[in-house]
Amino acid sequence: LVRVQSETAKADKKALEVAAQKERCQEKANIINSEKEEANRDLQRALPHLHEAEAAVKSITPRDIQELKTNKYPGSIIRLVFDGVLIIRQLKVCEVRQEEHNIKKAKVDFIHDSYDEHAKAMINDMRFLQDLMDFSNKEKDNINDETCELLEPYL
């Protein structure tokens, strides 16, 4: 009888430990589910922008690229968009320094663009359009938090 009582006490103690472990696991599962739901909401908000960007890339034609190549004095918006392309593709950009840009007929102090120093060479590469398409199809998922941080001033 003493042995049965001793084994029952051990079993009860183990049952309490298991119950506590189960409760901790359930708390972690609740946190994970909450984070999963938040991530899914963020994803649903981002998907329309992703689809819009994919459609924009698909709409670029060789003629568009040729027009960019022949534009001797691209506007500030074009120059800054190409900074974004350089950043997303993790290519070199100029050191950060302030420069005045003309945006929507207003003078704005912003970051010096890398168009002349780096983007022109990228645009003139024969594979530029194909590289953009390849990036859109295969590499866009490799955009990391650091790249997003670098893009933030442009947005």
Image: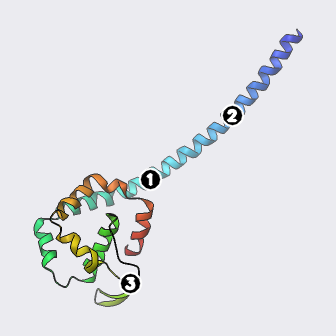
Q: What is the CA distance from the residue labelled 1 to the residue labelled 3?
A: 33 Å
Q: Which one is nearer the viewer's eye here, 17 or 78?
A: 78
Is tag 2's residue or tag 3's residue first in the polypeptide sequence?
A: 2
Q: Residue at x 41, y 70 (%)?
A: 150
Label 2 sits on a secondary structure element that is helix
Q: Which residue is mark 2?
A: 21
Is tag 1's residue or tag 2's residue first in the polypeptide sequence?
A: 2
- Locate the N terminus by quadrant: top right
Q: What is the CA distance from the residue labelled 1 to the residue labelled 2?
A: 30 Å
Quadrant position of residue 85: bottom left
Frontmost of labels 1 and 2 is 2
Residue 110's mark? 3
Frontmost of labels 2 and 3 is 3
Frontmost of labels 1 and 3 is 3
Q: Is residue 38 above or below residue 88?
A: above
Q: Position of residue 70 (x, y in %)?
A: 12, 78
Q: Residues within 10 Å of mark 3 (few under 14, many from 20)?
A: some
Q: Amino acid at mark 1?
A: Arg
Q: Amino acid at mark 3?
A: Phe
Q: Residues within 10 Å of mark 1 (few under 14, many from 20)?
A: few
Q: Which one is nearer the viewer's eye here, 79 or 19?
A: 79
Q: Which residue is mark 1?
A: 41
Q: Residue at x 32, y 56 (%)?
A: 140
Q: Is residue 86 above or below residue 134?
A: below
